[in-house]
Structure formats: structure tokens, C-alpha cells
Amino acid sequence: MIRTYQHFLQLTLSTAVVLLSGFAIMTFSGCDTASKKLNDLQQAVWQNPEDPQAYIRLGNEYARQRQYEKAVDSYEKALALNPQSGITVYPALGAAYFNQKQYTHALDYFEKSLEFSPDDSLRFYDIGNAYLQLEKCNLAIEAYLQAIANSTAFEEAHYNLAICYIRTGQKAKAEEIYAWLQDKNNYLAVSLESHLENAK
């Protein structure tokens, strides 16, 4: 099951946990439209090679088209031109590496993004997801708890926290989250219920 924030890159992993990032992939109705947009953004970079925003826009488009290595290259060029663009670029780099299943690199950039927004629930959520993929559930739990502390209604963070609790043998805590989700998000509650049943 996959859940996303609608931004720039959608995490496309076949996993039982809910994955979010600050970025979500947008698909286009035809290759021609995507190709033209990419060409226009490449032209903008060539015309303004010192503009970090042009590289960020190009990187976002590469990411939308799942050309993650090219996205990383564009984001890194933006960062070299303006280190303060890290507020946008670090989460984007983290998402690009995450989508390539390079979770350690993703984690590095998600953590760097906290330099700009130390109380950002979504960044803590991203960090939790990276730790979860690295099978470091205890560290994932800490990150999800921080995400929830900064945004108590963060349903997906509760859900992934419950998955971690199940994986670490803390079923009672997962059941508490299940009861909470029943009032908040039936879709997630039903999914979590199946994980709880399988944990018996």
C-alpha cells in the first residue's frame, strides 16, 4: 500500500508500510507533453546556467519522469550555486535517492533538511521511512514519534509507527493505534487490522 503527499515525487516501493515524501510523481497523458516540458526546462538551464531555481525545476521534472540520476545531478548543481537552496533541494535529493532504494543516502539528505526546518513533521516521517527500509525499527519509531509530536493528526505516521511496533513485538501499542485510526482513517485501519491478524 502506498500513500503520498501530493508534491513532486511519489515513493514507488512495494512495501506494507505507508510511504510519504515531500515529493510526488505526476504522470502525463502523453510522452510528447512530458518531452516538451523537459526540453523547455533544459533550455531554461542553458539560457540561465547561474540560476539555481532553473536547476531545481529541471530536477523536479526529471524526478516526475523517474529519471532520478539526472534529477540528483540537477539538484546538486542548484545546491552548488546556492547553498541556501538546501531548504528545497535536500528533501528532493532524499526523495530521489529513496526512490532508487539508496536509503542511506536518502537518510543523509532528509536529516540535512532538518537544518532548515527542525520541527518539520514530514522530514521526520521521511527519516522514519528510511530507517524502516534499513530495518532499523527502533530508530524509525523515534522518528515517527517526533513526526507525530509535531503533527498529532499525522495518520500515516501513526500507521507506520504501528507497523514498527508490530515488527518489534509491541503489539499492544499497535492495537492502540489501530483503535485510534478506526475513528480517523478507515482505509488505514483496515490495512493495519490485517497486519495485526498476521502478527498473531
Image: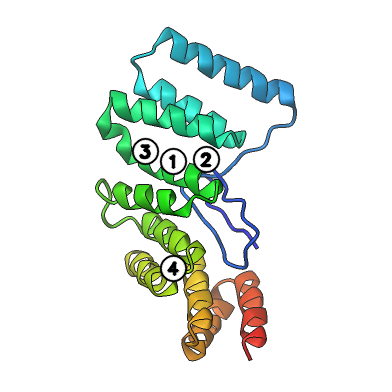
Q: CA distance from mark 4 to mark 2?
A: 22 Å
Quarter holding the N terminus is bottom right
Q: Position of residue 125 (x, y in %)?
A: 42, 60
Name the kind of residue labelled 1 in the image. Ala
Q: Position of residue 51 (x, y in %)?
A: 35, 18
Q: Say what secondary structure mark 2 lies in.
A: loop
Q: CA distance from mark 3 to mark 2?
A: 11 Å
Q: Earlier in the sequence, mark 4 or mark 2?
A: 2
Q: Position of residue 9 (x, y in %)?
A: 54, 43
CB under 8 Å between discs 1 and 2 = yes
Q: Nearer the viewer, mark 1 or mark 4?
A: 1
The tally of labels here is 4
Residue positioned 56% across, 15% down in the render? 40
Name the kind of residue labelled 2 in the image. Phe
> Which of the numbered marks, if any, corresponds to residue 8?
2
CB under 8 Å between discs 4 and 2 = no
Q: Say what secondary structure mark 3 lies in.
A: helix
Give the labeled residue for mark 4.
Answer: 153
Give the labeled residue for mark 3.
Answer: 88
Which of 194 and 106 lies nearest the eye of the viewer?
A: 106
Q: CA distance from mark 1 to mark 4?
A: 24 Å
Name the kind of residue labelled 3 in the image. Thr
Which of 186 and 147 lies nearest the eye of the viewer?
A: 147
Give the labeled residue for mark 1.
Answer: 92
Are there few (<14), some (14-19), or many (20+) residues within 10 Å of tag 1? many
Q: Nearer the viewer, mark 1 or mark 2?
A: 1
Quarter holding the C terminus is bottom right
Q: Nearer the viewer, mark 4 or mark 3?
A: 3
CB under 8 Å between discs 1 and 3 = yes
Name the kind of residue labelled 4 in the image. Ala
CB under 8 Å between discs 4 and 3 = no
- Asked whether, in this view, residue 52 is left or right of residue 34, the answer is left
